[in-house]
């Protein structure tokens, strides 16, 4: 099992094992260039080198199963090297194998165990040299090999740190990619929910207004048909009433069509679109809305549509939740930005109590404004109404 928080990766550079086995090969070449004495000592030295190589290969294959495998192999290999240094007093180069072990320990083990092993190798190396050569000669070999252990070990530790950071970075990038995918899917769901809410509102308007008007037209036409036989003098008045209802129905349908076609905002302008919407909310919901415009209208189609949606969503919330029939809409244009504020004096709410419970419409609107570089601010207090402020920077041509 891996220690908690430890990141291990198989995607390491082959330089680690190249350096490790280079140390082994260099020792083997030295042995061949300076033959070991014949007899028991020579056979033992070559046998121990074969054991060390077998342990190194096994360690390379099994090291990913658990860090305890690494500890076990390091213990066995350290014993082998210590024994090698005692077999032939004039072969100090066996100590190079400690350098290879230092690299492996700092690459394969977490911080504290790797530092502990690095210190252990320095102690074992010093002790084995002192036992093999005595204090004076052994001490002369110690600085070179200890420096090699420290330099190579610290390189291995730094390399492992960099590789773990790269692995964490890749993992974070993958998580961010997944989070981005989920956010896009969620944004699509929010947009779909907002569209469904808008369609529901339009269906309600169609039922409450246009359907009732068409029903009245049908009754008037039926009355005119019956009056042809019973009271022909009423027919002109009924036909005039029928014509008036037809004009009302046509006006309602045109209003609904404009609601369904947000491109009219860019075509007619933001101010004109707001005036029409204010009139519609007055007829549909009985809202008395004041519209105040400051500055010359400017901004691209995306800016105007976002501000229009902000007004529409805020007025929807006024009609549903404010318990008042009055609202104020203020539209401001400057060289740097366009801003719209929708304010009511209704019952309001406690923002702290409803944190994270923003409606689908406001959430989608906030995301849209942030995509344009702007933002949405909602100020509210119980009994003091709500103020919704949407800001969008004015993008210049070519920006």
Image (spheres, rainbow, N blue to C red):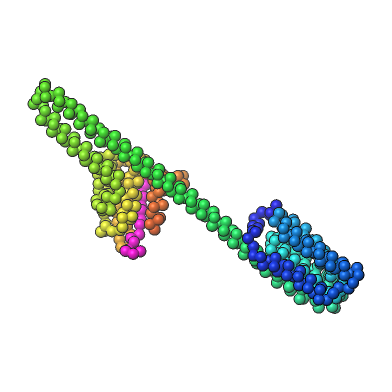
**Extreme left residue here?**
233
Q: Is residue 190 left or right of residue 271?
A: right
Residue 64 image position (x, y, % from top left): 69, 56
26 to 362, vertically: above or below: below
Q: Is residue 339 visible?
A: no
Pick the quarter of the image with the C terminus: bottom left
Residue 193 falls in which quadrant of the image?
top left
**Extreme top residue here?**
230
356 to 100, vertically: above or below: above
Residue closest to the eye, 357 or 35: 35
Residue 213 falls in which quadrant of the image?
top left
Magenta part of the chain: 386-399
Q: Is residue 53 left or right of residue 386?
A: right
Residue 314 image position (x, y, % from top left): 35, 46
Q: Is residue 226 visible?
A: yes
Residue 387 within the segment the image draws in magenta: yes
């Amino acid at each position: 099992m891996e220690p908690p928080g430890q990141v291990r990766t198989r995607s390491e550079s082959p330089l680690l094992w190249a350096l490790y086995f280079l140390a082994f090969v260099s020792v083997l070449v030295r042995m061949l260039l300076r033959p070991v004495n014949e007899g028991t000592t020579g056979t033992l030295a070559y046998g121990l080198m074969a054991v060390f190589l077998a342990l190194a290969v096994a360690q390379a294959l099994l090291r990913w199963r658990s860090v305890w495998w690494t500890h076990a192999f390091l213990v066995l290999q350290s014993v082998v090297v210590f024994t090698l240094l005692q077999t032939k007093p004039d072969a100090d180069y066996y100590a190079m194998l400690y350098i290879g072990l230092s690299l492996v320990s700092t690459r394969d083990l977490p911080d504290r165990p790797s530092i502990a092993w690095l210190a252990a190798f320095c102690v074992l190396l010093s002790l084995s040299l002192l036992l093999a050569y005595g204090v004076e000669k052994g001490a002369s070999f110690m600085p070179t090999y200890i420096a090699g252990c420290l330099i190579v070990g610290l390189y291995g530790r730094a390399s492992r740190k960099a590789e773990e950071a790269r692995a964490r970075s890749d993992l974070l990038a993958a998580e961010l990619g997944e989070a981005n995918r989920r956010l896009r899917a969620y944004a699509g769901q929010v947009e779909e929910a907002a569209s469904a809410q808008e369609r529901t509102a339009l269906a309600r308007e169609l039922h409450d207004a246009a359907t009732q008007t068409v029903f009245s037209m049908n009754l008037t036409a039926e009355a005119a048909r019956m009056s042809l036989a019973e009271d022909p003098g009423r027919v002109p008045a009924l036909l005039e009433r029928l014509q008036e209802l037809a004009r009302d129905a046509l006006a309602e349908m045109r209003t609904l069509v404009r609601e369904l076609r947000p491109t009219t905002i860019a075509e007619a302008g933001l101010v004109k679109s707001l005036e029409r919407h204010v009139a519609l909310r007055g007829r549909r919901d009985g809202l008395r809305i004041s519209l105040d415009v400051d500055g010359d209208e400017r901004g691209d189609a995306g800016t105007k549509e976002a501000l229009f949606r902000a007004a529409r969503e805020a007025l929807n919330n006024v009609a549903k939740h404010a318990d008042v029939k009055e609202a104020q809409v203020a539209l401001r244009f400057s060289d740097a930005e366009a801003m719209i504020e929708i304010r009511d004096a209704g019952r309001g709410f406690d923002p702290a109590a409803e944190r994270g419970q923003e409606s689908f419409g406001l959430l989608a609107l906030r995301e849209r404004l942030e995509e344009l570089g702007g933002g949405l601010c909602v100020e509210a207090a119980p009994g003091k109404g709500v103020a919704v402020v949407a800001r969008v920077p004015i993008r210049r041509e070519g920006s």
